[in-house]
Image: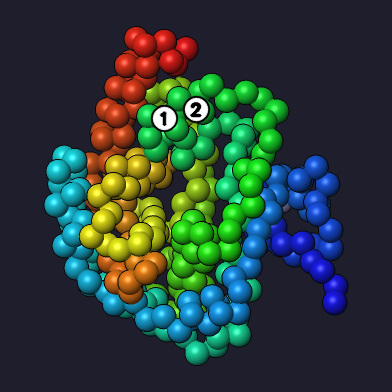
Amino acid sequence: METKWICRCLGSCGKMEIRRKPKRGLCPRCGEHCAPAILASDTQAAELAGTTWRVVAPTDVVPEIERLGLIATIPGDDFSADLSKISRLRNDVRNSKHLVAHRHIMGRSGFANGDLKTRSALNRAMSRGEGTSPFFPKPSLSDSPSVMGKFVEAEFGFRASRRVLKTLSLVSEQLVYEHPVLDIPINVEIDGSSENLPVELKTVTALDIISGKLRAIIMQLAGQAIAKGVDSGVLIVAEREGNRLTAVVISGLAEYHINKVERWVSESTQSGVLA
Ligand SMILES: [Zn+2]
């Protein structure tokens, strides 16, 4: 059997199967970085295809968002109808080529939206040197939470591309914007959109334990909103171990993001962390 090298181009080529490992980790088509990737096993693929998520109201998430001083609203009827459509299982179990998880990428040139998720991520990005290895050195385990999360996201993306949806799109988009506080270009990847708002799809073990991750998720969604020139975004959260699925519209993102980054920069400058 011919072995193929599965990777994901960080340029516009996306997921690829090539004959051999890309030279110096660069895409043979466009020359951008390629991240090594893994495919879901047959068991994982069958399980994902066969899962019907149960759409629930964002009861666990709304109070957490409001506690951070943001506005949380329930998405409209069209969006909810789309969410129900992608929550339903599919019978074409053999279609599993979309279930690809690529390795975490580090040391990419420039700043990424993920570098602004937390204070420590920003500090790391600020002190990062040139010429660092572009990939996280350890291979991800095929059943690690981050890999399972990527598979779940890919599954929803696949369903969204195959079903007729009114307002939700899960086609990813790459944008670059000039950061209002840091004055540097930030690379942003967006999972999807609804109207002109960014849509971020996240997975958690269970919905009621989202609060620990929420601040970082909101910083990420806020970066996406700023990149699109809007102040709101839609967060979709799916359970990995349970089967609940929910969505919430979050507003007031730009101010939240800018205040946070301003505070991190001024506090770090005082303590000498950021130059
Ligand atoms: Zn490429």
Q: Nearer the viewer, residue 219 or 36?
A: 36
Q: Is residue 85 above or below residue 20?
A: below
Quarter of the image containing the N terminus?
A: bottom right
- Secondary structure beneath dot 1 equals helix
Q: Please report the residue visible at 20 percent of the width from the left and 63 percent of the height from the top.
A: 58
Q: Which residue is mark 2?
A: 124
Visible in this render: residue 224? yes
Foreground: 44 or 77?
Answer: 44
Q: What whole-number distance in Å separates the C-alpha atoms at marks 2 and 1?
A: 6 Å
Res 77 quadrant in image: bottom left
Report whether 141 appears left or right of 179: right
Instruction: Write the residue at 14% across / 52% down.
Output: 63
Q: What residue is at 34 percent from the left and 27 percent from the top?
A: 261
- Indicate the amino acid at tag 2: Arg
Q: Which mark is residue 187?
A: none
The picture places residue 238, in percent across and down from the top left corner, at 35, 65
Q: Which residue is mark 1?
A: 120
Kind of residue sitting beneath label 1: Ser
Q: Is disc 2 in contact with disc 1, using a CB cutoff of under 8 Å?
A: yes
Residue 177, can we see it? no
